[in-house]
Amino acid sequence: LNAPPCHCSIGQKLKVEVKDVSEGKMCHSHNYSMPNEVNPTTCPDNFVVVSSVGDGTYAPPGLCAEFCMPSTSVPPQLTMSSCAGIGYDVFVEQKTISPPNISPSTEGYRRLQRNIDVKLYSNEGTIDCHCHSFENITCNAEGDGLYDEHISEITQFCQGIVNGTEYTCPYNCFQPFEVLHLHYLLCDYRIPHPFFKLIEKTQKCHLAARSYNGSECGSFETELSNQPLNEDSKGLSAGQIAGAVIGSLAILSIIIAIAAYVYKQNIRKSQTEKKQNASTFNSQKSDRPSSASPHEANGTNGDVTMA
């Protein structure tokens, strides 16, 4: 075929890098509520809300999955009720899953097989542990550029939330907001920006995925930042303090070694200069012509004869 050349036909190779799913995520714990926790599941026409607890397909063990199914084709293992209706009322997260490979004759099921939006709920009381996307804004003047970028984003994209014209926090607002939310908890170098405080007051942009068992908040640490994340503990960890002390001692030892080397070099230079000066003086002295005294010139030995 005389098809035009494409990247694949001319030998282009793609490099795929698989990363840890937890990379770029940071979890911490404090009492809070999320706006989407009060939003009930709504279904299109001819669909109903159903739920399933820990079945392994829609919900992991200990959680309730809530989603929509065609009203005429609800399998017997599913309950025609919301999760709150059967005692699971703590929102954990929302995800899209692929349903089991079943093929009933209904058009509703064929539509459903493409993807299912599932809300997961827990019945273990309020779980404060939750996770945000994370960007490491350096906790000193070096981080000013990235910090100012996030302030600019919330100022530009969160105006509708602050002035009340928007009721759902848009992604380009809550994403920089949650990065700043974590930054202010981690770093006391900067105080919260006034516009950030206005957004926080609306309680519409603290969007996060709750942990269903709190395990992600066990140590309050990530690879990107070993600082504790809870609000009552903003200091450095013991490991960071030890590392800082060791690093400082290493730098100090280098400075001392350099100073000692410079001192020895100056001593050697001074000694060399003294030797050179002494040698020059002796050389000049030996080369100086001798002169006879006036008495010796007159043939006397310094005796004076009185007349």
Image: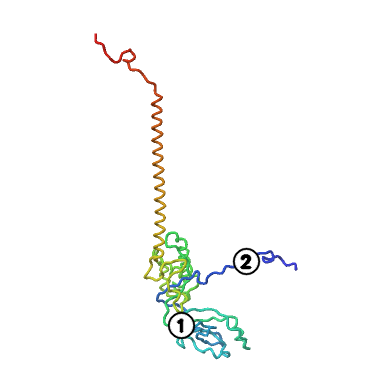
Which comes before the other along the chain, label 2 or label 1?
2
Residue 214: horizontal and vertical position, in percent?
Answer: 44, 77
Secondary structure beneath dot 2 equals: loop
Question: Mark 2 and 1 residues: CB-CB less than 8 Å, in contact?
Answer: no
> Alpha-carbon neighbours of circle 1 within 10 Å: few (<14), some, or many (≥20)?
many
Where is residue 182, by image quadrant? bottom left
Measured along the vertical axis of the image, is residue 163 above or below residue 257? below
Choose between 249 and 209: the one closer to the eye: 249
Quarter of the image for residue 189 reads bottom left
Kindly state the secondary structure of the residue where label 1 is placed: strand
Percent x, y for residue 57? 54, 83
Q: CA distance from mark 2 to mark 1?
A: 41 Å
Residue placed farthest to the left in the image? 307
Tell me the residue that label 2 is attached to.
Answer: 14
Q: Is residue 288 left or right of residue 302?
A: right
Mark identifier at residue 122: 1
Find the residue positioned furthest to the right. Answer: 1
Quarter occupied by the C terminus: top left
- Count of number-bearing discs: 2
Q: Amino acid at mark 1?
A: Ser
Residue 267 lies, in percent from the top left, at 39, 41
Nearer to us in this view, 13 or 144: 13
Q: Is residue 242 visible?
A: yes
Determine whether 203 is above or below 192 in the image: below
Q: Residues within 10 Å of mark 2 (few under 14, many from 20)?
A: few
* Disc 2 residue type (three-letter): Leu
How is the model colour-coded? Answer: rainbow
Question: In percent of the image, x 40 and y 41: which residue is there?
Answer: 268
Position of the N terminus, as image quadrant, is bottom right
